[in-house]
């Protein structure tokens, strides 16, 4: 796997084609990303929980586009790997055109190779619009922290009859052209079913552990956080010390 200044960074098409065999993922800031990603990780997500971890916000809802750009720029200076930046609440939901305008700005000003946005069927049109215009998109369904007020808290999604909704959201994101998909805080059985059904790599996150990774056959590098926030305490969404978790090979298409 690539190290800083060592080999060429992987790309979103690499992940789409090879699944997580192509990558290992941390989440970090400039001062922590070098030890976290060298030489163990190939993809870095700059998550919007930076607002909670570093700015003391009670949720991710107050995070601005300017915050994400600033932190994306800081992380970019510390690594050469593929970097994905979260699109913050309010920066993409209004229309596909708004999403493209802001995503293009994030990519241009941070040097990231892709963006991540939350939402399922309701965001499929936007994901398709971005993908068709050169913006690689990582999707995010299940518990979507930016919708915490709608959910009434950071609760597990997809239990019982709600499983159909989460499954439909995942399929819509996949068919819209996302190159990868985060499944946050969904039951393990549902996460594994979705992973087998969709045509893109998935990462499924549960409280303090990685549940699934499509074709993930190598050690995955994550960052854990002791700060409070969404119950998943997921490495994709928080910063902290490097933590290496054993992979769980998954069967998929």
Image (cartoon, rainbow, N blue to C red):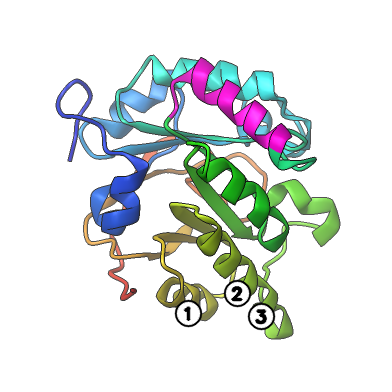
| Cβ atoms under marks 3 and 2 closer than 8 Å | yes
Determine the image quadrant of residue 216. bottom left
Residue reaching furthest to the front: 132
Q: Residue at x 69, y 85 (%)?
A: 160
Main SS, magenta region, reads helix
Q: x, y (%) of residue 248?
A: 31, 67
Determine the image quadrant of residue 101. top right
Can residue 206 be seen at all in this image of the molecule?
Answer: no
Q: Which residues are magenta?
A: 97-112
Q: Secondary structure at mark 3?
A: helix
Residue under label 3, please give it. Answer: 164
Q: Quadrant of the C terminus?
A: bottom left
Name the mark on residue 245. none
Name the mark on residue 167. 2
Residue 98, magenta (yes or no): yes
Q: Secondary structure at mark 1?
A: helix
- Residue 40 shown left or right of residue 30 in the figure: left
Can residue 38 be seen at all in this image of the molecule?
Answer: yes
Q: CA distance from mark 2 to mark 1?
A: 9 Å
Q: CA distance from mark 3 to mark 2?
A: 5 Å
Q: Residue at x 35, y 39 (%)?
A: 43
Q: Residue at x 72, y 25 (%)?
A: 64
Residue under label 1, please give it. Answer: 193
Residue 155, magenta (yes or no): no
Residue reaching furthest to the left: 6
Q: x, y (%) of residue 186?
A: 59, 69
Above or below residue 142? Residue 44 is above
Q: Nearer the viewer, residue 164 or 219?
A: 164
Q: Nearer the viewer, residue 161 or 172?
A: 172
């Amino acid at each position: 796997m690539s190290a800083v200044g060592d080999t060429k960074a992987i790309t979103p098409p690499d992940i789409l084609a090879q699944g997580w065999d192509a990558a290992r993922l941390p989440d970090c800031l400039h001062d922590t990303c070098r030890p976290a990603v060298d030489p163990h990780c190939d993809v870095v997500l700059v998550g919007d929980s930076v607002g909670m971890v570093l700015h003391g916000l009670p949720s991710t809802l107050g995070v601005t586009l300017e915050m994400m750009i600033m932190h994306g720029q800081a992380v970019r200076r510390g690594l050469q790997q593929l970097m994905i930046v979260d699109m913050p609440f309010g920066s993409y939901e209004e229309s596909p055109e708004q999403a493209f305008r802001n995503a293009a700005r994030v990519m241009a000003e941070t040097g990231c190779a892709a963006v991540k946005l939350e939402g399922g069927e309701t965001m499929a049109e936007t994901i398709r619009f971005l993908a068709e215009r050169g913006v690689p998109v990582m999707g995010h369904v299940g518990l979507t922290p930016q919708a915490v007020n709608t959910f009434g808290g950071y609760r597990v999604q997809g239990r019982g009859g709600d499983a159909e909704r989460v499954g439909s959201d995942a399929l819509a994101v996949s068919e819209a052209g996302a190159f990868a998909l985060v499944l946050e805080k969904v039951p393990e059985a549902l996460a594994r079913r979705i992973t087998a059904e969709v045509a893109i790599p998935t990462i499924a996150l549960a409280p303090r552990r990685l549940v699934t990774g499509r074709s993930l056959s190598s050690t995955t590098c994550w960052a854990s956080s002791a700060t409070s926030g969404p119950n998943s305490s997921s490495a994709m969404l928080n910063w902290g010390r490097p933590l290496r978790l054993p992979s769980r090979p998954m069967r998929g298409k």
